[in-house]
Image (cartoon, rainbow, N blue to C red):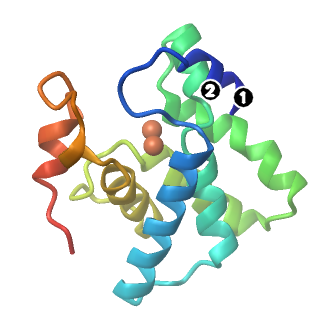
């Protein structure tokens, strides 16, 4: 995350550091709680959210899709934190799916992360609305 912070120092659009991860975690957890689909532990949801963009620096440096890089980088961290193999697979799938459209056929966690990723942005008050490709997508997203 320090690497991402450094590479995004001059970035004018939304950043992808700790605060973004925390916002996505809180929103994804609340979304799943309200939907009555809390089949995963809070720890798994928060881990997925904190790690979903951890590969951003790889994308900046190599062009690789950061969802793929994030899942790869997340695996050893999840193992060190002793998540069981079933939970790790669910978390990695969620990370891989977080950039896809929430209405695609996503896993429950993937859908929650994709929605929370959009809802975590304060597009309504952003001065870069005209320049941001995410603006229309996020503003047109139905809030459940
Ligand atoms: Fe992302
Ligand atoms: Fe994100």
Q: Which of the labelled discs sits on residue 13, or is there none?
A: none
Alpha-carbon span between mark 2 and mark 1: 5 Å
Q: Secondary structure at mark 1?
A: helix
Q: Is mark 1 within 8 Å of ligand 2?
A: no
Quadrant position of residue 11 = top left
Q: Residues within 10 Å of mark 1 (few under 14, many from 20)?
A: few
Q: Which of the labelled discs sits on residue 5, or is there none?
A: 2
Residue under pointer 1: 2
Report the residue that reaches farthest toward the top.
Answer: 62
Residue 45 is left or right of residue 139, and the answer is right
- Kindly identify the residue that appears in the image at 79 percent across and 65 percent down: 83
- Are circles 2 and 1 on residues that touch, CB within 8 Å? yes
- Kindly identify the residue that appears in the image at 60 percent across and 21 percent down: 57
Q: Position of residue 12 (x, y in %)?
A: 37, 21
Q: Nearer the viewer, residue 28 or 12?
A: 12
Q: Position of residue 136 (x, y in %)?
A: 11, 40
- Kindly identify the residue that appears in the image at 11 percent across and 26 percent down: 130
Residue 5 is left or right of residue 12, and the answer is right
Q: Position of residue 45 (x, y in %)?
A: 59, 67
């Amino acid at each position: 995350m320090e690497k991402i912070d450094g590479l995004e120092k001059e970035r004018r659009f939304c950043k992808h550091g700790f605060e973004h991860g925390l916002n996505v975690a809180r929103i994804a957890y609340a979304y799943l709680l309200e939907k009555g689909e809390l089949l995963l532990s809070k720890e798994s949801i928060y881990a997925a959210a904190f790690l979903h963009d951890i590969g951003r620096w790889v994308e900046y440096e190599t062009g690789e899709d950061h969802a793929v890089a994030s899942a790869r980088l997340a695996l050893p961290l999840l193992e060190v934190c002793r998540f069981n193999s079933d939970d790790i697979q669910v978390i990695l799938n969620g990370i891989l799916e977080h950039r896809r459209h929430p209405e695609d056929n996503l896993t429950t966690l993937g859908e929650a992360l994709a929605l929370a990723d959009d809802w975590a942005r304060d597009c309504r008050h952003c001065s870069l609305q005209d320049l941001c490709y995410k603006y229309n997508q996020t503003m047109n997203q139905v809030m459940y």
